[in-house]
Image: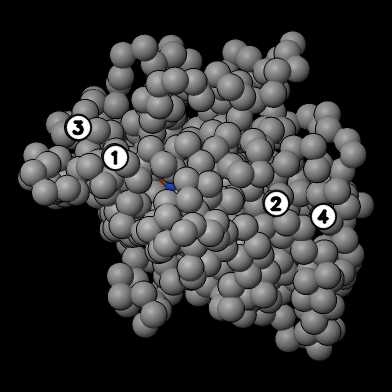
Amino acid sequence: MTSLTSLTLTEARDGLRAKKFSARELAGAHLKAMEEARGLNAFVLETPEHAQQMAGQSDQRLKKGDARPLEGIPLAVKDLYCTEGVRTTACSKILENFIPAYESTVTGNLWRDGAVMLGKTNMDEFAMGSSNEASAFGPVQSPWRRKGSNAPLVPGGSSGGSATAVAARLAPAAIGTDTGGSIRQPAAFTGTVGMKPTYGRCSRWGIVAFASSLDQAGPFARTIKDAAVLLRSMAGHDAKDSTSADVKVPDFEKAVGKSVKGMKIGIPKEYRVPAMPAEIEKLWAQGAEWLKKAGAELVDISLPHTRYALPAYYIVAPAEASSNLARYDGVRYGLSVPGHDITELYQKTRAAGFGREVRRRVLIGTYVLSAGYYDAYYLRAQKVRTLIKRDFEQAFAQGIDAVLTPTTPSAAFAIGEKSGADPVEMYLNDVFTVTVNMAGLPGISVPAGLDGGGLPLGLQLIGKPFDEETLFSLGHVIEQAAGKFQPEKWWAA
Ligand code: GLN
């Protein structure tokens, strides 16, 4: 029998139902793999008691033939999701030892469907970052290494722990969040599938807020089919989130394997950025070729406002973050550093509790929202956002079904390589992903190949609002053609 940790989500689901192994055995195998992989720092909290107890319940349901959609499936949860009675920190010192009294809607949906919680995963503090180096718990190490080198690489961010857990086979699947690329970029860096659904597809209730108009929950998995199954359980309308959409949740799994014949795929010329490695350019052309062979039609399109997306994102996201993070005042949650009056308590708590990148975002956000600068920065960025959205709408109005781009402008880089004095170096990682959040569209990153150093690269598919199904169908074509990619195990306890 293949080892239990090498099973995909749907293989595990089917194996459990066929009684080939129990949910407790499946959870136990993953908990053991997590212990052996502690050096990767993917988890900031392991929850073995929860896992075994939930798996025990699943075994009873399985025995009765009463299995729910994710019965007994172990999952890793980004530490941005509030989990009732289980420490949730957003990987910030300011939420040190915060134990929520409630469960996020998305995690609640997963437990309702029978999933088993393995633990909470590492991430950039408050989901601000592209490398998982900005975590109060220290960086995550990617399970991948460049050929001939032992230099530790970043897994991408901000959902670096979830991506690593899935790539290193510590969990068959995981959940993350994506505000500007935090699911798709780490998915590309780790050779996993990651989807940011349409804004409103999943409830944001109970997810620690970063930039509320951009934040969206989404799945990580090792196959397209697994991501589709997981998303179905995560999604759905929630009266507790006024931005969650009251639309039907399709059976996404059915879209996997569906023909893409006759679909029109837009290739936007603006995503051909200077200094992009030739390997990425080549992979992009290869991906287009695979889709064409499957019967899709390639169409050159223009999304003219793409070049303004990154600067506009880095105004809108910090602006929303600065107001969302105002609640961490030393009174209501987590860390509290006393002062001689309330103002000093605020100042001392926030200075001690927020890391460097979070402080930078709060400063930028406060600045662009301040009287006198509001029109010049925030309002202008909002107008740019409308134009970016309109670019996509025009492409879709011309009959384009989905857009194909690279996910990232490079493969994974070394820990420390881009975390120096200039934050823009890190921000540039997001050039291909932020447009999708600005426009509220669904996007998926599909593993598509390896670079010369043997590191994974991803291709991104961008779809129409609430048309994740087309992305799963197209993603499956790329997956079939490209094959799967997994790192060699070099870590040990
Ligand atoms: N890297 C981007 C940022 O730092 C996106 C992060 C995210 O999607 N949460 O803002």
Ligand 1: give its quadrant: top left
Which percent across, then down, holds residue 263? Answer: 31, 46
Name the front one of labels 4 and 2: 2
Between 358 and 476, the one nearer to me in the picture: 358
Between 231 and 240, the one nearer to me in the picture: 240
Residue at 58%, 51% (x, y): give it: 93
SS type, badge 2: strand
What separation in Å lies between label 1 and label 3 (alpha carbons)?
18 Å
SS type, badge 1: helix
Q: Earlier along the polypeptide chain: callout 2 or callout 3? A: 2
Amino acid at dot 2? Val
Q: Are marks 1 and 3 in contact (CB under 8 Å)?
A: no
User: Within 10 Å of the Cα at label 1, are there few (<14), some (14-19), or many (20+) other Cα atoms?
Assistant: many
What separation in Å lies between label 4 and label 2 (alpha carbons)?
16 Å
Residue at 46%, 59% (x, y): give it: 340
Quadrant housing residue 156: top right
> Is residue 165 visible from the viewing direction of this image?
yes
What separation in Å lies between label 2 and label 1 (alpha carbons)?
29 Å
| Residue underneath mark 3 | 308
What separation in Å lies between label 2 and label 3 (alpha carbons)?
36 Å
| Residue underneath mark 4 | 30
Which percent across, then down, holds residue 231? Answer: 51, 63
Name the front one of labels 1 and 4: 1
Residue at 88%, 35% (x, y): give it: 492
